[in-house]
Image (spheres, coloured by chain):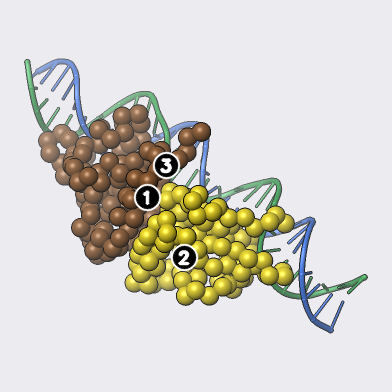
Chain colours: A yellow, B brown, C blue, D green
Amino acid sequence: MRALTHPDRSQLHIETVLEALANPVRLRIVRRLAAGEELTCGTVLPDVPASSASHHWRVLRDSGVLRARREGRIILHTLRRDDLDARFPGLLDVVLTALDAEPDDGGRQP
Amino acid sequence: MRALTHPDRSQLHIETVLEALANPVRLRIVRRLAAGEELTCGTVLPDVPASSASHHWRVLRDSGVLRARREGRIILHTLRRDDLDARFPGLLDVVLTALDAEPDDGGRQP
DNA sequence: CGGAAAGTTCGATTTCTGTCGTAGAATCGA
DNA sequence: TCGATTCTACGACAGAAATCGAACTTTCCG
């Protein structure tokens, strides 16, 4: 198990962040973290296989959207609101607001 | 040649817009349109084959990021700033500001 | 009318993403 | 120490997206 590394604030890249956000599963994660709570991988995507979920958490971490902290055998994640706001002011807010105005799946159910 | 159709403002979808923006070629287009100028397809991506470029313009149109207007044999494109600001206030601004702070290729050259 | 220009569409190819099972590491509690 | 829990790593596969040449449409102009 590799150490949890994150790009630092100055390395955040708008294109990478947009790529990370442009996915329905990852938007679900971001949305759940919006309240500020620290959440474990397991709690957010009960319907998704662990290995798939892990992939999405990683994309969000690697892009700098989330910060991870290992606590024993679990990993606690938070939104990097401070860093995102510093580098891309308003981005997170507008995405979260837009998500709130939509159903949980982003309006993709029949 | 099909008519140029656009999703209307109420149909704009944050996830679709993020997907459209999460691509380096398309970000180049958006960046060039940021000044408010109406531009033709041919003027923005001289290095990209026309058929590839056409694909990207289409993604941007279909997602609602751009508005197209046919003028004879050319197509004039503009950013849908009004609609994007109405539905996702601040999104375009933060993306454009972030792009301005980066090199033209988004920092991907060696 | 004929040819050039601007874009699109189509189809083939390649490349990138997402999905998921399996296996493994680390931690905890009994 | 054994087994359960939590999560990651790997590898295979499928589907989606990007790329691009070739053919086509429409328009403009000589």
Residue under pointer 1 = B98
Dot 2 lies on which element?
Answer: helix
Badge 1 density bin: few <14, some 14–19, many ≥20, Cα 10 Å: some
Badge 2 density bin: few <14, some 14–19, many ≥20, Cα 10 Å: many
Question: What's the residue at 30%, 55% (across, down)?
Answer: B93
- Chain letter of the residue carrying label 2: A
What number is the disc on residue A30? none
Question: What's the residue at 26%, 58% (across, down)?
Answer: B84
Report whether residue B106 is seen.
yes
Dot 3 lies on which element?
Answer: loop
Name the spot of residue A18 as percent of width and height, x first: 43, 53
The kind of residue on which mark 3 rests is Gly
What number is the disc on residue A81? 2
What number is the disc on residue B106? 3
Question: What's the residue at 12%, 39% (across, down)?
Answer: B71
The kind of residue on which mark 1 rests is Ala
State the CA–CA distance, disc 1 to disc 2: 16 Å
Q: How many labels does the image show?
A: 3
State the CA–CA distance, disc 1 to disc 3: 9 Å
Nearest the eye: A69 or B8:
A69
